[in-house]
Image (cartoon, grey):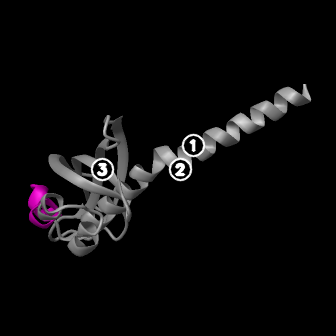
Amino acid sequence: MRRFLLVLLVAGAAYGVYRYSVVEPPWRAFHAFARDWAREDTPAAAAWTSGEAAKKAVEEKILRGVVRAPMEAFRGSREELESRETAPDGAVLLTVRQSVFYDPPGVTSGVGGAGVAAIRHVARMKKTADGWRIVEWTPEFLEAKARR
């Protein structure tokens, strides 16, 4: 019985290390990118890219240009991983749904935002010397609606 518990404990620890060091780093890097992009901090978001095409996409597709709703105040964002695929070359393709909470002009909610916009991101990520970076990225506006 002790041997079984020891094997179970070692297997659980190995799985945790695998998830932390192999599976989650691309997701953590994209999460940081999406947070910076939603805050409209273009230089910080561009720092999560590798290559001119991805950097240019970040500079051209700012939040207020992608979301087709008037936004006055940013109130936070949340990201949900929809899918994750690994390519034969080691790249990771993430599809992420981001909810951006905001106040429309003339409305001040104080906390949480009076509106929410949904954006679907498709990002191709590769591991570089600086860590995981976005090499291709496309945001797609899905919807905007009132929360209150």
Residue, x 9% and y 55% (percent of image)?
A: 68
- Circles 2 and 1, Cβ within 8 Å, touching? The answer is yes
Q: Residue at x 9, y 61 (%)?
A: 65
Local packing at callout 3 (Cα closer than 10 Å; few below 14, some 14-19, many 20+) is many
> CA–CA distance between discs 3 and 1?
18 Å
Q: Position of residue 100 (x, y in %)?
A: 27, 57
User: Pointer 1: what residue?
Assistant: 18
Q: Is residue 44 above or below residue 114?
A: below
Q: Main secondary structure of the magenta part?
A: helix
Earlier in the chain: of badge 3 and badge 1, it is 1
Q: Quadrant of the C terminus?
A: bottom left
- Please give the range of residues in magenta: 57-68
Q: Is residue 148 visible?
A: no
Q: Is residue 83 magenta?
A: no
Evaluate if marks 2 and 3 touch, with contact meaning CB atoms under 8 Å apart: no
**SS for dot 3:** strand
Mark identifier at residue 125: 3
Alpha carbon distance from label 2 to label 1 = 5 Å
Question: For residue 42, which numbered disc appears in the image?
Answer: none
Three-letter amino acid code at disc 3? Met
- Relative depth, front residue between 118 and 8: 8
- Circle number at residue 21: 2
Residue in the image at 26% along x and 71% along y = 108
Q: Callout 1: 10 Å neighbours few (<14), some, many (20+)?
A: few
Q: Quadrant of residue 39?
A: bottom left
> What's the CA distance linking mark 2 and mark 3?
15 Å
